Amino acid sequence: MNMKKLITLGAGLPLLPVIGFAQEAVEAVEDIAEVAPSFDEIGPYIMTTLLFLVGGFLVFWMAAGFTMLEAGLVRSKNVTTQLTKNIALFSIAGIMYWLVGFNLMYPGDGFNGYVGGFFDITVLEAVGLGAADADLEYASVASDFFFQLMFVAATASIVSGALAERIKLWPFLAFVVVLTGFMYPISGSWQWGGGWLSEMGFSDFAGSTVVHSVGGWAALAGAIVLGPRLGKYKDGRVNPMPGSNLALATLGTFILWLGWFGFNGGSQLAAGTVGDITDVGRIFANTNMAASAGAVTALILTQLLYKKVDLTMVLNGALAGLVAITAEPLYPTLFGALWIGAVGGLIVVFAVPMLDKFKIDDVVGAIPVHLFAGIWGTIAVVFYNPEVSLMTQLTGIVAYGVFTFVVSIIVWYIFKMTMGIRVSAESETTGLDLTELGMEAYPEFSKG
């Protein structure tokens, strides 16, 4: 049929029904438009949900960073054990935070602001949730739960590295159950759940204290109860026990550095406006600067002090810079982030030998990096946020320290008295991979 004939046929159709149908369609579209929310209404919800999801999977990648860092810094006979501990603790954290932790932590205004609701299992939104039923003031519960869960797992990973090479697997995992299900959520509710420290004005943007110092205090308590590795301190000397693979340790540090952009950037908790997303970019830049300054500070200091650069100190210097800036990565200038991170690197270089003087054996340097640099970063907030007082920050530091350290000491001693937390001297000498798991990370090497 040619075009001329088609036009002729079309011209013969009655136009009034067609026009009426078109008018009804327009009216229907207008009615839908009046009911459906505009992008201005749903845009912030969508963008913040995406921020949590993207930030969450970046923080998830930090689990691989902790694993590689620990695998590289322990001796080859204990590598498989560290790999097992890290995947197990991450999985346990996922279950415990769903079962107890999330609603114990949010909100934190129950019991006079000290804790949320006990045994309140996390429930996600219905499948195919409509805009009319969503809480457009924030983000989806699922994305928030996923993002916050990654922080819980990171806290447990801090403890894993410090207690490596002499702790039994199952008592450690039992501690992880207590830490991720109860200890971390309770103390976290004080600040991030709108609890008493939040009301007081305590400020910890992404967790220098809430996450890192909590992991550091728990690790310190465990190291004290557990004791040092055999032969670490002998005849008044500190005997170095080099790690198995510094390439893995360096890879782990870079993975942690990458994941930290999600850790700090996602903690902006909003991405619905130009100002929000610009602030996320500023947080990324400051986070990177602090890590760089921490690494360079450790690089220079170890050269000056020991006449040779210590790679493990440089790696931990970068991590200490990251921990230090985490309490306030938004307000400082780039120079501010630089000097805050540099102090973090300095802390590591001097804190590691200090712990050795007290015969506190921290295999990977987790206590100087996460506890000491975390305390420093929380104090440093006062230099760039005029609304925060030093006394309030110190109150928060002490509160988290006393609660976490005391409860951790009690839990570790209970496990020590009941199931035992340390492997035998023979097992420690042979290596935990064979005695605890019956498999080696590098079986070909041991055959020579």
Image (spheres, rainbow, N blue to C red):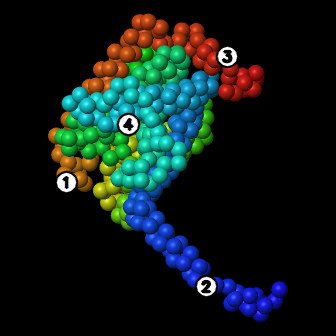
Q: Which residue is mark 3?
A: 438
Disc 4 to disc 3: CB gap under 8 Å: no
Amino acid type indicated by mark 1:
Pro
Mark 3 and mark 1: span between their CA atoms? 56 Å
SS of the residue at dot 1?
loop
Q: Mark 4, mark 3: which one is toward the viewer?
A: 4
Crowding around mark 4 (Cα neighbors within 10 Å: few <14, some 14 to 19, many 20+) is many
Which callout, 1 or 4, points at the residue further toward the start of the chain?
4
Q: Which amino acid, mark 3?
A: Gly
Q: Identify the residue position indicated by label 1 in the image.
A: 386
Q: Earlier in the sequence, mark 3 or mark 1?
A: 1
208 on left or right of 257: left
- Label whose residue precedes the other's in the sequence (2 or 4): 2
- Using the image, determine if residue 447 lies above or below residue 353: above
Look at mark 2 in the image and give the residue it sits on: 15
**Three-letter amino acid code of the residue under disc 2:** Leu
Please tell me which residue is depicted at 56% across the width and 14% down the height of the picture.
428
